[in-house]
Image: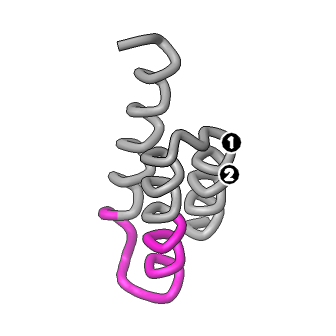
């Protein structure tokens, strides 16, 4: 696993954990939507889009 791949995995896991811990409501729903889009971007090897969606998911939980 390259350092870049490891960093992506850690960030995905951190955002997923934050989504799971968030209280139910529209913010959590929005965060999950962005998280799923980030997973899709990762599977398509679109790192820029993945990071953008992860940041959007974190912002939705604030």
Does the stretch in magenta take in 54? no
Task: Specify the label residue 52 is tagged with.
Answer: 2
7 up-or-down from 25: above or below? above
* Quadrant where the image shows the N terminus: top left
Quarter holding the C terminus is: bottom right
Question: Would you identify the image quadrant in which residue 61 lies?
Answer: bottom right
On screen, residue 26 above or below 39: below
**25 sits to left or right of 34:** left
The prevailing secondary structure element of the residues shown in magenta is helix
Q: Which residue is mark 1?
A: 48
Q: Which residues are magenta?
A: 20-34
Could you tell me which residue is drawn at 43 percent across and 64 percent down?
A: 36
In percent of width and height, residue 27 lies at: 53, 79
Circles 2 and 1, Cβ within 8 Å, touching? The answer is yes
Name the mark on residue 35: none
Q: Identify whether 61 is placed above or below 28.
A: above
Q: Position of residue 50 (x, y in %)?
A: 58, 48
From the viewer's perspective, is residue 12 above or below residue 36? above
- The chosen color scheme is one colour
Q: Is residue 23 left or right of residue 29?
A: left
Residue depicted at x 40% and y 32%: 10
Dot in front, 2 or 1: 1
Q: Nearer the viewer, residue 49 or 62?
A: 49
Magenta segment includes 28: yes
Q: Nearer the viewer, residue 59 or 12?
A: 12
Residue extending farthest to the front is: 44
């Amino acid at each position: 696993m390259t350092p870049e791949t490891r960093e992506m995995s850690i960030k995905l896991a951190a955002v997923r954990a934050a989504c799971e811990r968030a209280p139910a409501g529209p913010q959590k729903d929005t965060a999950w939507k962005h998280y799923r889009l980030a997973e899709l971007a990762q599977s398509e090897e679109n790192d820029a889009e993945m990071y953008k969606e992860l940041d959007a998911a974190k912002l939705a939980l604030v």
